[in-house]
Amino acid sequence: MLGPMARSLVVKATAGADAPERCAQAFTVAATAAAAGVDVSLWLTGESTWFALPGRAQQFELPHSAPLGELLHVILTTGRVTACTQCAARRDIGPGDVLPGVRIAGAAVFVEEAMAEEARALVY
């Protein structure tokens, strides 16, 4: 589908249940890219930070959208998922609270990933 590329995609989700279509778009694009073999890094910021917790993605519903829990599983299996340090702290979410495979990191790591050679970044 994509051919031989050494590109990475950094997707920042800034919305959760407060803006369900924007949230679902971020997860859908990240999971689609991951399934196609792209190196994907999904960042959970703002209200999407809640999806770093066990069971939260499964509670999300949006008609005509793939289940968020399944999309998150694809990304966790083939890429990276990061919860924003400040966003997590504001919600009292710590490293021991998140799903296995989810890390908590800050802006310096996001900038490093987004500025890597051949990286593309999308913000939803």
Image (tube, rainbow, N blue to C red):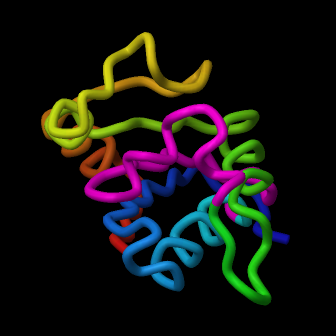
Q: Is residue 59 above or below residue 56?
A: below
**Please, which residue is most extreme toward the right here?**
1
Q: Position of residue 117 (x, y in %)?
A: 35, 48
Horizontal side of residue 43 vs 58, given as left or right? left
Q: Is residue 55 magenta?
A: yes
Residue visible at 41% across and 36% down? Answer: 82
Q: Where is residue 22 in the image (x, y as percent from the top left)?
A: 46, 81
Q: Position of residue 96 (x, y in %)?
A: 43, 11
Residue visible at 68% across and 62% down? Answer: 33
Q: Is residue 33 above or below residue 85?
A: below
Q: In this view, does 47 lie above or below 112?
A: below
Pick the quarter of the image with the C terminus: bottom left
Q: Give the range drawn in magenta.
A: 33-59
Q: Is residue 30 above or below residue 41?
A: below
Q: Which of 117 and 58 is in front in this view?
A: 58
Q: Is residue 11 magenta?
A: no
The image quarter containing residue 4 is bottom right
Residue visible at 75% across and 34% down? Answer: 77
Residue visible at 52% across and 34% down? Answer: 53
Q: Position of residue 54 (x, y in %)?
A: 61, 32
